[in-house]
Amino acid sequence: MKPRLLVTGGAGFLGTHLLQRAKEFIPAGTLHHTAATAIPGITFHVCDLQQPEEIRMLLDRVRPEIIIHTACSDQGDNLSAIVPAAGLLAMQAAERHIRFIHLSTDQVFDGTAAPYTETNTPCPINPYGEAKTRAEALIRTLYPQATIVRTSLFYDLGKPDRQIQRLIQATQTDKPFQLFIDEWRSPLWVETLADAILELANKEVAGILHVGGPKSLNRWELGIKLLQHFGITPTFNIKKCTIKESGLIRPKNLTLNSSIAQEILQTPLLSFQEAQKKATK
Ligand SMILES: NC(=O)c1ccc[n+]([C@@H]2O[C@H](COP(=O)([O-])OP(=O)(O)OC[C@H]3O[C@@H](n4cnc5c(N)ncnc54)[C@H](OP(=O)(O)O)[C@@H]3O)[C@@H](O)[C@H]2O)c1
């Protein structure tokens, strides 16, 4: 009998890919405001993850053996939901002995001491990183057996995701669009990330795990690679920029060391080049 899996944020970027690839599970997803693209065989449940009673009813109905909590990212009004949703879900999962995997971010760090391992102490410098850091701490207190997956930017090679859509739109205008050459990340193909998380769903891994790509890229490099992947020639208005020039306060180097994850997992954490080769096979 396949295990019952609940993916929160089932209509989100990662949630959709997880649900599409969860062949070894009986999958269900949660929705909040956004209607999900129909995925054959997937049941969706509307739930506000800030409402304890809604979560209780959801878990009574779905009776999941595993929860993968992708909901509540840095988009829109999601920020204020990050901590309460993580706490409520972790508490319920602990009480019901449900395996719990929470999605966190490289932005729990300030970008001054890369590459980051699981033992580095979080030191966020933006509200998103702060909320994710608080969510991690709450989960570790409420449910120490939970897995906290810290990942980096993830990208789609099948169709342009919302970040690349913005970049593609910019190539159709004259408006300058700046990409940082000094913001370094460990980007990972969303399909690789989904496979790694689904593999973790069947493993007892407690605590924090870094799951990023093996090669760090700056925002400029990643943006240009993705544009070219989708057959678009970068236009004159796509410009290199430094964080200092932008006047923003952003972490500079958030490279993740994911060597522990790569030892635990059979799923290879592919570089951009390797992912592109696999995607276009
Ligand atoms: N995208 C990245 O590159 C990246 C990088 C590092 C870490 N992460 C983390 O990875 C996870 C997935 O990211 P993503 O980009 O796939 O996210 P996403 O596409 O923005 O999806 C997030 C989902 O959360 C749902 N949500 C927000 N508030 C909710 C609430 N109160 N109750 C129920 N659902 C709620 C949203 O539903 P509605 O739209 O219906 O409101 C949305 O479908 C997040 O935890 C994010 O922090 C993402």
Image (tube, grey):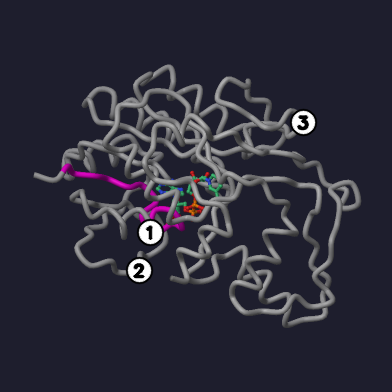
Q: Where is 144 relative to 155, above or below?
A: above
Residue found 70% across the figure and 37% down from its top: 126
How many numbered callouts?
Answer: 3
Q: Residue furthest bottom?
A: 172
Query: How many angstroms separate mark 3 from mark 1 (CA)?
Result: 33 Å
Q: Secondary structure at mark 2?
A: loop
Task: State yes or no: Cβ of the residue under disc 1 lies below 8 Å from any atom of ligand 1.
Answer: yes
Task: Give the side of residue 218 with respect to residue 197, left or right.
Answer: right
Q: Nearer the viewer, residue 220 or 94?
A: 220
Using the image, tell me which numbered label, if any, was put on residue 16: 1
- Indicate whether residue 10 is drawn in magenta: yes
Task: Give the side of residue 114 with respect to residue 95, left or right.
Answer: right
Task: Give the side of residue 104 with respect to residue 166, left or right.
Answer: left
User: Callout 1, which amino acid?
Assistant: Thr
Around disc 1, counting alpha carbons within 10 Å, would you say few (fewer than 14), some (14 to 19), or many (20 or more)?
Answer: many
Write down the region rendered in magenta. Answer: 3-15
